Amino acid sequence: MPSSIISVTTSCATSTKRFSAGDMMSCSGSGKFQEKVSDPLVRKMLGSLGFEPAVIERAAYVVSHHHTYTDIDGIDYQILVEADFLVNLFEEDEPRSAVESVAQKIFKTETGRKLLEQMFLAPQQTEPKAVRR
């Protein structure tokens, strides 16, 4: 189920053939705006793609609450919150102190912590690892 939820949030911009421009506009904006408008969008998108009602219900709940950081009630919800934080921290170019605070308060999964470390807390490299010998 988590991959279904992640695909809803990441495929939004690629679904223009199935959804109107108004639907697509609701894929962006402030966190609280996203929470407010995402429930019907998720339901419409997943319903048209033939997902089972239980998957639609869970996806709609998780996506429409992903800026609410209390009562995270499943690994799917936790992964979505962490992924959203990674994107937001990158886009906002937050200071190291903010990243460290988020690391302690929000990040619970091993993969999320590793990504946060690699992206924001590890010492800067002069060249990509793939080039090093």
Image: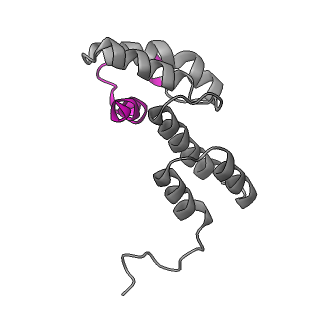
Q: Is residue 52 magenta?
A: no
Does residue 17 appear left or right of residue 97 in this picture?
Answer: left
Residue lying furthest left in this view? Answer: 50
With respect to residue 92, does 132 lie above or below? below
Residue lying furthest right in this view? Answer: 97
The stretch of residues the image draws in magenta is 1-24
Q: Quadrant of the N terminus?
A: top left
At horizontal 47% and vertical 17% (from top left) the residue drawn is: 22
Nearer to the camera, 73 or 128: 73
Please identify the quarter of the rendering in which residue 122 is found: bottom right
At horizontal 55% and vertical 37% (from top left) the residue drawn is: 81
Nearer to the camera, 17 or 59: 59
Q: Is residue 5 magenta?
A: yes
Please identify the quarter of the rendering in which residue 70 is found: top right
Q: Quadrant of the C terminus?
A: bottom left
Q: Position of residue 5 (x, y in %)?
A: 39, 30
